[in-house]
Amino acid sequence: MTETANWIEKFRQKYGQSPRILHIGNIANNAYNNAKLLNNAGLDCDVICYDYYHTMGCPEWEDADFIGSVRDQFFPNWHSLEMNKFQRPLWFAQGPTKLCIRYLLAKRQSGLKSARSLWFQLGLYRFFRTCLVGNYVYKKLLSLKKIKDSYTQPVLGAYSYAKYQLKRCFINKYTRPYLRKYFPKLKTSKDLPESTKSLFEERVEEIIQRFKVNFSERSDQLLATDLIPYNSIIPLWSQLFDQYDIIQAYSTDPILPLLAGKKYFAFEHGTLRDIPFYPNTQGRITAISYSEAQHVFVTNSDCLENAHYLAGERVSYINHPYDESHGDAISGSEDLRRRLCKELDADFLFFFPTRQDWVVGTGYADKSNDIFLRAFCQLRQSGYKVGMVCCRWGKNVQESIHLLKDNQCDKYVLWQEPMGTVQFERTVKACDVVVDQFKLGSFGGIMFKAMAVGTVICTYLNEAEILNQYQELPPIINCQTEVQIVQAVQELINHPENINRLSLSAKQWIDKYHSSSLTVQTQLQQYKLLLMPD
């Protein structure tokens, strides 16, 4: 029995149950993937994904081999797609904040009947939110594309108001009777005596004082008005937190357990690049909540310096939570490759799924997509039969399309909507090279998911920074300029045996340095220090 399994077993013997963990927030499905890994390791995890419905915050995006296109990325209508029998796990609560909290409380307090009812209500709410209202009005608005903005804007305003009214009526008619019948009313700040209400104000003052100590050099000090908006909801969160042994909050959500006076772990995924230093409410609450965390898990190497600035030595670099064997069983990549080669008149395929953001002043401009697009055009114009699949997301999709058209290479590029993980992995396996960013110097999900299935990566990595975290560099094509890309790809095309070498090396590197077991172990080591310090 490993040391990790040993302390978990001791915990079970002492408390009669596995350690219970609540994951708060689910941007890019990090909480969902992480909870899956930790549940498989013997822990008891729930995820609360409140008031957030983006495709990349839904289990379907990660694990369903769905057929069809997600029209609205922020409010995906999964009911309109073929899901191939995928079912959401009962430990993943997504919907309005209070309804999610009520469901998880019922689930944790053995209220089976209540939990079933509330689970049904969460599904019904999502169906209403994304299908009954969104799609109908969406279709109507599409017919108004040619109408002048002076006419369109009032319609959009009416659309927002109609959504609010329909939602309010729906909740009144269908949801509230169930809540009254099956679940007692939860306490809010309005239900608490004056002495209890003042506890929140005292907590706010404590946090303000901590900010003054931790960030005395900042001219924008934390204000009570930054925290008062949480007054009405923190009592509900506190009731939920009491059901768990560990609270792990992602992105900017660590402010919730901090306000509730609970110990917590903070998990960042690019959050610490800029947000904590914004001279606004979001910047201040992010800074203080990370600085007061029990421990901070960092998934982006370029954020480590900022993490140490905020939390000192209470920082661990951690791999993005992901099961490296996820793509092994995916089929259909050979047929897809044949179709793509025929459609794009190509015998060498690139997959460029990265967000299109490269024009300064229009978005993040942090990917430098144009460098690779120009290299692709140069390769094609030089006689190489290369083709490419790109994803239609980011601020500069149209600029990228125009760049390809200007170079008479647009017919060799297929634009598709952003892909769920299963389709993503199938496309990765169908292509020769996966392309990522050429500016940041770090890597994220695109790179390690592609390497996990043995596909060659072309991107820019800051090697010195990467070697601070890993003992050896990942086996990729490391480029930052158009000339470097063209030369590297020409070498790869002319010596195809190198593709097999890089493919094998990529999987070996993932197994050694980026496996899910390492992700789990890093967290369990810190959990043990809190739960079983002896």
Image (cartoon, rainbow, N blue to C red):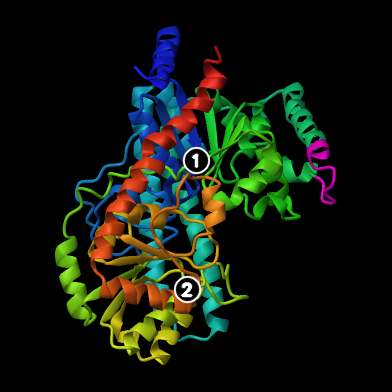
Asked if the stretch drawn in magenta spans residue 206, the answer is no
Q: CA distance from mark 1 to mark 2?
A: 27 Å
Q: Main secondary structure of the magenta part?
A: loop
In this rendering, the answer to whether 123 lies above or below 362 is above
* Residue 527 at x, y percent in the picture: 51, 25
Q: Is residue 270 visible?
A: no
Q: Please tell me the numbered disc located at residue 67.
A: none
User: What kind of element bears circle 1?
Assistant: loop
In this rendering, the answer to whether 474 lies above or below 8 is below
From the viewer's side, name the closer residue of 345 and 19.
Answer: 345
Q: Residue furthest top?
A: 14
In this rendering, the answer to whether 354 lies above or below 113 is below
Going by the numbered disc 1, the residue's amino acid type is: Ile
Q: Quadrant of residue 398?
A: bottom left
From the viewer's side, name the closer residue of 15 and 136.
Answer: 15
The residue singled out by tag 2 in the image is 369
The residue singled out by tag 1 in the image is 318
Q: What is the span of residues highlighted in magenta in the rendered image? A: 211-221
User: What kind of element bears circle 2?
Assistant: helix
